[in-house]
Image (cartoon, rainbow, N blue to C red):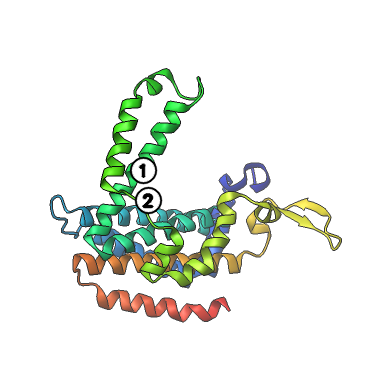
Amino acid sequence: MGINEEGYLSEEMNDIEKEILHNHNKYFDIARRLNILGHSMKFKLNIHHKDAQEITAASLYVSLLESFNSIYILTSKGLIVDSNILLRSLLEKTLRLKYISMSYENALDYHKASEKERLKLLNSIHNANEGVFSDEVHSTINKEEIDNLKEMIDLEGIKELPSNEVLARMTGLEMIYQNAYRVLNSYVHTNATLINKFVKTNEEGMITDINWFSHFKNISSDVEQVMFSTLYLILTATETIIELFELEYDELIQSLTEELDQLFPLRT
């Protein structure tokens, strides 16, 4: 069966993937080399015992690599919408990695902030209507535990993390945040702008067809935009890890950065 019958699971996708990889080889080639670098680095991180900053940064970086790989796979198959959803996640992880790398105190604050999220979750379970959560789950939450957690948060003055916009300013990533984050939100929250990407309209604005398959339309600029932003973020994250753990990859990173900079005119 073909694409119309099996969608992206069709064997015809093999040829389409080859075409996308060929047409945008300069982006995917840098991605493959960055991927090898990132995965080789994770085995060279000298993480000191009980060092919250190093442990958190290393864990976030591995998570970043997974998202990076996922975006590569999805984009190579023309799944642009889902690639953009993951791209927003990649941006948020990079913001947090940069924030954590700035100081040990930031790493501690990152973990402490999770207690406020835990309090929200416990309250949600405790106050949920019958049947929303299983009796087993509901029985593990009691008012005393919630009150003790709230008291600890209040006593220690635990605050939520700064917003993504503030993190972007703090970490020097404000430009990509302003250029990309708000656009990427439309993919995550599935607003009307996203819906419009899956229909064809005539000159009068009437819907004439379902535009269900990304490859049936020109996605060249979309592929390049996703890949450029992804490579920029993973380079930023990799540089952050190299600096934090004092690794010797400066020349290689500089070379990859220069190659990426040379691709920018291709997007104009």
Q: Quadrant of the C terminus?
A: bottom right
User: Where residue 111 appears, x then y in whole percent?
Assistant: 29, 49
Of labels 2 and 1, earlier in sequence is 1
In the image, residue 8 above or below residue 203 = above
Q: Quadrant of residue 19?
A: bottom right
Q: Which mark is residue 214?
A: none
Question: Which element is circle 2 on?
Answer: loop
Instruction: Give the residue at x 38% y 61%.
Output: 95
Q: Quadrant of the N terminus?
A: top right
For disc 1, the marked residue is: 116
From the viewer's side, name the closer residue of 29 and 186: 186
Instruction: Give the residue at x 63% y 56%.
Output: 214
User: Where residue 112 appears, x then y in whole percent?
Assistant: 29, 48
| C-alpha span from label 2 to label 1 | 7 Å
Question: Which element is circle 1 on?
Answer: helix
User: Where residue 110 appears, x then y in whole percent?
Assistant: 31, 52
From the viewer's side, name the closer residue of 63 and 216: 63
In the image, residue 145 above or below residue 37 = above
Q: Which mark is residue 160?
A: 2
